[in-house]
Amino acid sequence: MEASLITIVLVLSIVSQAMAAALAFQLARESRVGWGWLLIATVMLLMGIRRGLVLGEWWVAGVQPVPVAEAVALAISVLALFGVWGIRPNLTAAHRYSAFLALEAQRLNSVLEGLPGLVYRCRNDPQWTMEFISEGCRSLTGYAPEDLLGNRRIAYAELIEPEDREMVYNTIQEAVAQRRTYRVVYRIRTADGAVKWVW
């Protein structure tokens, strides 16, 4: 490989690695897994510095670069640049979508906080295992929502008065089997021992 071609290869390697490092640093700032991108950016930067040292040694000390090694370094640099460049739009879109979902969750929570009572989603099991439960749980039951989520501290079925449990379960199972809506009026016992009617 002649000298001017080796110079072009080295310069292209340095530029490609610097661009890949800059993009990876940007992704490190925008991404949840920023440390991974920071590592990639650092490796790209170090590779660019190494190529610069090879170029400097050649110009200053006359140490001839190994043409095959420089061609491989250029190929790696270009592939790294295109790899980071290709991943960037997907990560940027994912980051925007995550931000959108967080905003929507915040909006939904503000709506739910304004509702009297509680909003929930539970499994159709004898414990009525809660998968989601709004903040209204606190004022209605005296328990924090996280106490009922996944039956962590107490199952919702345990709040239902023992005399009402079978009626509640059977009424809901019948409605589910017939694929119709239902309304059940029953009593619960709150954290402080008070009895409340719910529907």
Image (cartoon, grey):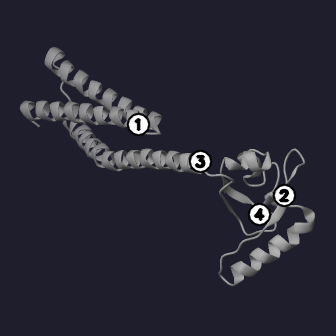
- Measured in 3D between alpha carbons, the distance from the residue under mark 1 to the one under mark 2, in whole angstroms, is 52 Å
Judge the density around disc 1: few (<14), some (14-19), many (≥20) Cα neighbours within 10 Å. many
Q: Residue 50 is drawn in which quadrant?
A: top left
Q: What amino acid type is highlighted by mark number 4?
A: Trp
Q: Residue 49 is drawn in which quadrant?
A: top left
Compare residues 111 and 37 and report the one nearer the observer: 111
User: Mark 4 or 1 closer to N-term?
Assistant: 1
Labels 4, 1: front one:
4
Residue positioned 35% across, 45% down in the render: 92
- Tell me where residue 151 appears, x and y as whole percent: 78, 54
Q: Is residue 157 visible?
A: yes
User: Mark 2 or 3 closer to N-term?
Assistant: 3
- Residue of label 2: 188
Q: Look at the numbered disc 2 and give the secondary structure of its residue.
A: strand
Residue positioned 29% across, 32% down in the render: 22
Q: What amino acid type is highlighted by mark number 3?
A: Gly
User: Mark 1 or 2 closer to N-term?
Assistant: 1
- Measured in 3D between alpha carbons, the distance from the residue under mark 1 to the one under mark 3, in whole angstroms, is 41 Å
Residue at the top extreme of this rendering: 60
- Residue of label 3: 114
- Residue of label 4: 128
Q: What amino acid type is highlighted by mark number 1?
A: Trp
- Tell me where residue 121 appears, x and y as whole percent: 66, 61
- Residue of label 1: 37
